[in-house]
Image (cartoon, rainbow, N blue to C red):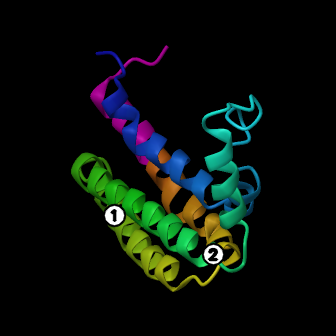
């Protein structure tokens, strides 16, 4: 049986969410990868305005709330995927990930700055990403999924 995108979704979602915790890099490098480098005539003026607002102490809060909701939404998806896929792999670890994820959501909701969010990245990595990855590996072994 081959490995599918659906199989790797929980781990991929953890990786993408972990990247969101690097809030300083998100703020400072917003759209710098290609969109602002290519100086797109249509997109650049709007993106520069957004980037300035994102890094302004006056308007930062509105971006912070949106950023927090994106992280929380991803963690909610991770909880759902872990609960449905990995309970038969390791019920104890599944329960632990769900409990830790709920606690982390509470802490994210209380964050008052991008820095507060960034401080939670090691918790996410150790309590969510690494256990999910371990359960994913066990899931592959139990499912006899071939990885090339």
Q: Which residue is mark 1?
A: 92
Q: Are marks 1 and 2 in contact (CB under 8 Å)?
A: no
Main secondary structure along the magenta-highlighted residues? helix
Regarding residue 134, the answer to whether it shows in the image is: no
Q: Nearer the viewer, residue 139 or 101?
A: 101
Mark closest to the chain's N terminus, 1 or 2: 2
Residue 134 image point, x, y percent? 48, 46
Residue 37 shown left or right of residue 22 in the figure: right
Residue 111 shown left or right of residue 58 in the figure: left
The region drawn magenta spans: 135-148
* Mark 1 crowdedness (10 Å alpha carbons): few <14, some 14-19, many ≥20: few
Q: Nearer the viewer, residue 45 or 73?
A: 45
- In reply to whether residue 143 is colored magenta, the answer given is yes
In the image, what residue occupies the spot 49% across and 50% down? 14
Residue 16 image point, x, y percent? 53, 47
Q: CA distance from mark 1 to mark 2?
A: 43 Å
Q: Which residue is mark 2?
A: 59
Q: Nearer the viewer, residue 28 or 95?
A: 28
- In reply to whether residue 132 is colored magenta, the answer given is no
Image quadrant in which you'd find residue 117: bottom right
């Amino acid at each position: 049986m081959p490995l599918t995108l659906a199989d790797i979704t929980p781990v991929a979602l953890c990786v993408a969410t972990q990247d969101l915790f690097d809030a300083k890099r998100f703020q400072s490098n917003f759209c710098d990868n290609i969109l602002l480098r290519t100086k797109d005539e249509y997109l650049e003026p709007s993106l520069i305005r957004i980037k300035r607002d994102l890094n302004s102490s006056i308007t930062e809060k509105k971006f912070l709330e949106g950023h927090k909701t994106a992280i929380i939404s991803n963690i909610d998806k991770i909880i759902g995927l872990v609960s449905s896929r990995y309970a038969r792999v390791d019920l104890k670890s599944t329960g632990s990930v769900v409990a830790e994820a709920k606690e982390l959501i509470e802490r994210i909701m209380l964050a008052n700055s991008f820095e507060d969010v960034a401080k939670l990245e090691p918790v996410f990595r150790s309590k969510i990403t690494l256990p999910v990855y371990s359960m994913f590996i066990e899931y592959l072994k139990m499912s006899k999924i071939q990885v090339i």
